[in-house]
Amino acid sequence: MVMAGEGPQLEQVYEVLLRAELERHVHGFIVLGEDGELLFTAGDLQVHGLSRELHELAGRHGLERIVAYTSGYRLLYARIRRYGVLVVTEREESLGLLLHLLEKMFSEERGPR
């Protein structure tokens, strides 16, 4: 697994997410590293105060997704173990699209099984 902040793979994740925001009208999102640190943000989603707490909750319970309500946001977290990041966004369709784009990108890199 690529650890947060290492190598070109994480830069590719950022590129995919930014492209999704610009071209596919994904609302804001943030990307958290494995220690709950804020790695990257785009759009107007600001959840700095709660990010580490929810990340730790996900890790303790082995959850892939968490829904939390804070400061008027309904947040959807999806942990992507393979990339060592947690993607946070506000809308289910945005989360699904981001995960789909990441899966597509990395499955193409690995080639057919």
Image (spheres, helix red, strand yellow):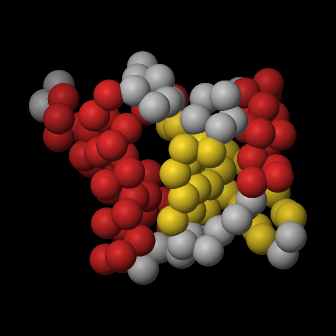
Q: In the shown orientation, is residue 100 left or right of residue 69?
A: left
Q: Is residue 63 visible?
A: no
What residue do we see at 17% from left, 40% from top?
108
Placement of 39 over or under 91, stated as above or below: above
Q: Is residue 50 visible?
A: yes
Q: In the shown orientation, is residue 61 left or right of residue 111?
A: right
Dividing the picture into quarters, in which one does residue 39 lie?
top right
Placement of 40 over or under 93, stated as above or below: above
Q: In the shown orientation, is residue 104 left or right of residue 96?
A: left
Placement of 94 over or under 53, stated as above or below: below
Residue 101 locus on image (x, y percent): 33, 55
Question: Quadrant where the C terminus lies?
Answer: top left
Question: Quadrant where the N terminus lies?
Answer: top left
Residue 20 locus on image (x, y percent): 36, 67
Q: In the shown orientation, is residue 8 left or right of residue 38?
A: left
What residue do we see at 82% from left, 52% from top?
49
Dividing the picture into quarters, in which one does residue 58 lie?
top right
What residue do we see at 47% from left, 23% from top?
3
Residue 103 locus on image (x, y percent): 34, 44
What residue do we see at 24% from left, 37% from top?
107
How many marks the image carries: the answer is 0
Residue reaching furthest to the left: 112
Front-lying residue, 37 or 97: 37
Residue 70 locus on image (x, y percent): 86, 64
Dividing the picture into quarters, in which one does residue 16 lie?
bottom left
